[in-house]
Amino acid sequence: VKTRGRMEVMDTSNETTLMTLEVAYRREKLHVTLPASSTVLALKQQLAVLTGIQPQHQKLVAKGMLGDDRRLEEAGLKDKSKIMLVGTPQEVVTQVMAEKVSKEKFATEPVRPNVVGEEPKKQKRFHYLSVIEDLPRAGEAKELLERVAADSGIQYLMNKYDWNVVYLKELSVNQSDKLGWNVNSGLEISLRLRVDAEHISEFRSFPEIIDVMLHELTHNVFGPHDHNFHSFNRILATELAEFRTNEKRLAMPYGSLMEETQKRSGLRLGTAESSSGSTPASHSSTTHHHTHSARDMAGAAALRRLSEREQAVEDGCAGAMTETGLLDYLHSLQHE
């Protein structure tokens, strides 16, 4: 039964003691009424009608995880108790499994060479995108998230490492100290698009969001923020930078590309000549020393800047979490 502003399912059995539970699912509040002696599994079956999430794919949290065999009253629930639901709709599960089967079948089939001029098939890497619809400029937020998902550099890395993200979401500004998180190695990646709660209509810069995206993609491989994580994160950053450089050069007109190539070659030749016998040895040595020192200083400064950026992103990362870890974190926010 759908009533004004809320969805409600009522199980009117012969039991006299009924309770109505408020279930938080994404941005909805679902109200389910059923006997207090019902099991958690019976509650999940009612929720399956409302959400399309099969009971085996549901996780219910109310002061801890709720087991299927427990009775609602035994679990400490009472009328108007609040519960949190996390789960994946059946159609998403079916689609992901179908893609997995298709990928495994493709791996066993002989590779068909591309016909000349034929575009290679592009695999969908981000399945569902969502933003917070009731915030200002939601349309622009969606365009920004779509831009992140469609970014050629991000797509390049996703294809190279064969990654898939089921849910790419906007992170709520209520988690003002968080810039992003990754749940179950890419099942869900959430990114903060807006500056903060005080500047809710202003968006963070695209490069800042991409930095966080790279960080969260690193969590597809490494969970803790340890040496392995930082090393792989820098590899991804380097690969992305190289891809963008090559992409930019390929987009240059032929004449400009040749001019740049000749300029670079000339600089290399000029350096070689100045360090040959045409310049006094003492002057050459001094010039080389100063050039080397300047290069070292610039390199060290670049590393410091990179480290500062990495640290800023890491400070804002909620880390790699399982669904249970995410539930515990969100549950703690409800009681702050």
Image (cartoon, rainbow, N blue to C red):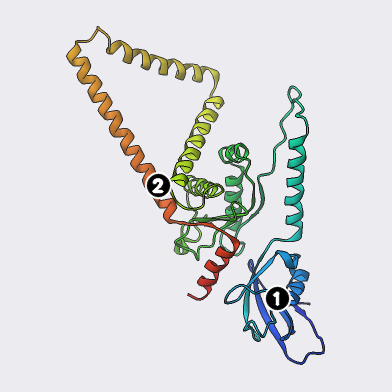
Return the mark for residue 309.
Answer: 2
Q: Are the residues tagged 2 and 1 within 8 Å (C-beta)?
A: no
Residue 107 shown left or right of residue 188 in the figure: right
Q: In the picture shown, does residue 206 fall above or below 75?
A: above
Residue 99 shown left or right of residue 239 in the figure: right
- Sequence-wise, the earlier of marks 2 and 1 is 1
Q: Quadrant of residue 47?
A: bottom right
Q: Return the residue found at the far bottom.
A: 16
Identity of the residue drawn at 45% across and 56% down: 316
- Disc 1 secondary structure class: strand
Q: Return the residue found at the far top.
A: 277
Residue 326 in percent (x, y) is at 56, 63
Q: Quadrant of residue 17?
A: bottom right
Identity of the residue drawn at 47% across and 64% down: 197
Q: What is the count of numbered marks?
A: 2
Residue 126 in percent (x, y) is at 65, 48
The residue closer to the viewer here, 49 or 327, is: 327
Q: Amino acid at mark 1?
A: Arg
Return the mark for residue 6.
Answer: 1
Q: Amino acid at mark 2?
A: Arg
Give the mark toward the camera: 2 or 1. 2
Q: Return the residue found at the far front.
A: 69
Q: Return the residue found at the far right.
A: 14
The residue closer to the viewer here, 116 or 44, is: 44
